[in-house]
Every structure is written in C-alpha cells, then in structure tokens.
Amino acid sequence: MPSYFVEGGHRLSGKVAIGGSKNASLAVLSAAMVLDGPCIVDNLPQISDLETLLEIFQEIGATVERLGPGRVRLDARTISTHEALSENIRQLRGSYYLMGALLSRFNKVALRMPGGCDFGSRPIDLHLKGFQTLGARTDIRHGIVFIEADELTGGGIFLDTVSVGATVNIMLAAVKAKGKTVIDNAAREPHIVDVANFLNAMGADIRGAGTDVIRINGRPYLPGDREYSVIPDQIEAGTYMLLAPLTGGDIEVTGVIPKHMEPLTAKLEEMGVVVEEGDEHIRVYMPEGGRLSATSFRTMPYPGFPTDLQPQTTVVLCMAEGTGRMIENVWENRFQYIDSLRMMGANIIMSGRLAVVQGGAPLTGSHVDARDLRAGAALVMAGLAASGITEVYNVDRIERGYEFFIDKLKRLGARIQRSPAL
Ligand code: UD1
C-alpha cells in the first residue's frame, strides 16, 4: 500500500509539461482495435491505466509494440477472440470500450463487467441501448456482458443522459456498421472529438463530433496505417492550474489546448486569479495583493465544469475567502473525500449533491486515504496547503491517471516523497 508523505506550506512555481489525455487515450487505443490495419498512437500518458489496457489487448491477441515513451504500434488483425474476461478488465472503467470495439470486429463480444473509480452507480444501460439500436442482442449474466448481432446496421439513437462512454462505444460499434448512424444528445468532450479524428484519419466517416449530433456513415473497411497523436490531458492540466491559487504560487502549464481549459479558466478568473493564455500554454497566478474569493461550481458535461476536477477545486475553495458551493451533477457519490478534508480541518457542510465550503479554516496534516483517482490528487493538494505532514495512502490509485505525479510536483517546489519509492 504505497503512500505519499507531503510537507505543506510551500509555494509552488514554475513550468509543468502536460501529458496526453488519459480518457482520450483509452478511447483512441480501443478504437484502434476496430481497424483492418496497423496504426501508431503517440503522446500517450505514462500511467498504469494505459498499461493495463495494453495488457488486456495482448491477452486477446492484439499486437502491441512499444516504440518509445508514450508511443505504440498496434495491430488488431491478430486478435483471436471476442471474449475479454480477465481480471484486468475490472481494474479500469475504460475497458468498457472493448464492448463497442469487439462487437464491431466480430459481431459479438463477451466482456467482464468493467470496474474503475467508485463514485456511485456506474450503469451501462445507454451503451446497451445503443448496441440494440444497431441490431445487437444484449444480456448480462454472472458479471459478464454478452452482446451479439447477426449484422450491425446503422440507426438513430437518442441518449437521454449525456454519456461520454456511451457516445464513444456507439461510435465504435457504428463505424463499420451497414448504413448511417445518428447519435443525438451526444457527449461533446474533447476526447469524443479526438476519437472521431482518430477514426477519420484511419478511414472512417464520422461528422459532427464536438456537437450534440454525431453522424456516422459506416465504412466496411478501415485501413489504418497512419500515425495519430492524442490531445493533452485537460484534467491533469486543470489540477496543476489549481495548485497556483492553492499555494499562492505561479504555475505555467505547457503543451495544452487553452480552449479545452475554458470551463476552469472562467471560474478561476471569477475567484480573482490571473490566467494568461498563450497558444499552447497557460500561466496562472494571484495578482499582487489579490485575494482568492469563493464562488459556486456546478459540474456538468462539457463544456460545463468537469466533474473530474470537482475534488481538486473543492480543496481550493477551502483556501478561499467566503462561502463556496460545489454541486455535483454527474455522479451520485463523488464526495467521499470530504470526511478526509474535514479531518484536516476543513469546514464543509454536505447536503446531498451540494457541498458548502466555508473557506479560510486552516488545514493541518493528517493520514488520509486516496479512495479514487481524482479525490486522491485532491488530498495531495490539501496536504500541500496544510501545515505539517500529510500521509496520503493507496496512492497507486492516483498513479492510474497522473504521470510522474510526484516528480512534476517536486519540480514545482513541492516537498513530497513516495514510500516505497518507485
Ligand atoms: C467518463 C470518464 C470519467 C468522467 C465521466 C464524466 C473515462 C474512462 N471516464 O466516464 O472520468 O468522470 O466520463 O465526464 O473516460 N450514465 C447512465 N447510463 C449509462 C452511462 C452513463 O445513466 O449507460 C450516467 C452515469 O451514471 C453518469 C452520467 O451518465 O451520471 C455520465 O456518465 P458517463 O459520461 O458515461 O461517464 P463515463 O464514460 O463512465
């Protein structure tokens, strides 16, 4: 059970290079499993979730060649089975993309139910509804999802809840289906656009990604044989941006797409933080003599405020002047870290999906559990702002999604150690 030991009270400053997007990579790599030829994917983050996904690909027979850090060559033509049942599937939510990918490849799939972060019920009904519209039969038995079609044919699907995973999965299943598929009320996250761009570069015909209507003209053969670089991780970038007001520091995130950061940028400015945008970087700092003021947040699908930045932002509200509000609209149970913050001295009142944060209560070091990826990062942030030492344990959950986390923090001036060392 690895831990981080964090010494708080140090101002963080400097530049930090942002890696490739975790969620885009999981989707793009899975999309590569649909292709009829090889491809090269670049700018992948070096995180354990991707390692696990690549292991799963190898378990089902795909050819995975590591060409260098963050760069792989994939060939799905060697996949020998439509069954993905290993224990690895349960380690990450992103393995659910194998439903769409293997269904597209074999017209059938048997997948162990995926796991991932626990923040309440994580249904897949919309994914299944999408597959059914394309002509598949679906069944869940003994923790395994079975999906099978005689032939996949295009259709019209309205998603009654905006779902990233269902949007991607339906795209994967539809990309080689016969005829045209229209996804209405589709998710608009940057990684949806990234998967569509990837598949189009490999020979697909997908239009409208990034809007709420995506149109897919099925193409029977996707040659691949191209190289693709995934987008930067907006959640990693957002986490480092939030560290500047949290520690009274001055941080520049580099290698980012500033447009993707707008939901956060707008709110930071509202709190009195200076955010300067370049073409591919963003600098964040507090103005001379400025004060961090509290505000209200409401998580929403993109372009709303991302739920994956909710815990990290709540920690910043703890340091702001006044009463801040955080409403979690996406997940039913994503406030499990609040008790840990309270243990560190935070003044937070909960009411269902609303957290009311009375800013300014001094945080003090404590022993806290990284119960999930983003909540874990948030507790490290709380440790950086607290007096004394904080031990965050179960940090392998953080390392699922943040590459070189403590190295990057150290370069910004953080005092943090891992035990056992990596
Ligand atoms: C993805 C991200 C996750 C992020 C989430 C929301 C990955 C691997 N994970 O998760 O980090 O927090 O988007 O931005 O990319 N829902 C249903 N039925 C379904 C599917 C979803 O009701 O079949 C509901 C969920 O309960 C949730 C909402 O839709 O309330 C959004 O979920 P969704 O966008 O699907 O999240 P994931 O794709 O699982």
Image (cartoon, grey):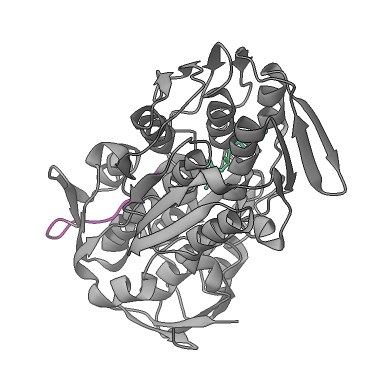
Q: Position of residue 345 (x, y in %)?
A: 51, 72
Q: Nearer the viewer, residue 84 or 282?
A: 84
Q: Is residue 366 above or below residue 32?
A: below
Residue drawn at x 56%, y 48% as measured from the top left: 78
Q: Quadrant of residue 368?
A: bottom right
Residue found at the very far right of the displayed protein: 142
Residue 176 visible from this viewpoint: yes
- Horizontally, residue 264 falls left or right of residue 174, namely left
Q: How many numbered discs, if any?
A: 0
Q: Is residue 353 above or below residue 59?
A: above
Q: Nearer the viewer, residue 171 or 247?
A: 171
Residue drawn at x 69%, y 20% as measured from the top left: 151
Q: Quadrant of residue 388?
A: bottom left
Q: Position of residue 112 (x, y in %)?
A: 74, 50
Image quadrant where one finds the C terminus = bottom left
Image quadrant where one finds the N terminus = bottom right
- Horizontally, residue 370 falls left or right of residue 214, namely right
Tell whether position 293 is magenta: yes
Q: Nearer the viewer, residue 412 or 196?
A: 196
Q: In this picture, which residue range is highlighted in magenta?
A: 287-295
Residue drawn at x 49%, y 28% as measured from the top left: 187
- Horizontally, residue 138 falls left or right of residue 250, namely right
Tell whether position 395 is magenta: no
Q: Is residue 390 above or below residue 35?
A: below
Residue 233 visible from this viewpoint: no
Q: Position of residue 234 (x, y in %)?
A: 35, 47
Ligand 1: give its quadrant.
Answer: top right
Residue drawn at x 61%, y 16% as measured from the top left: 158
- Magenta span main SS: loop
Q: Position of residue 246 (x, y in %)?
A: 32, 63
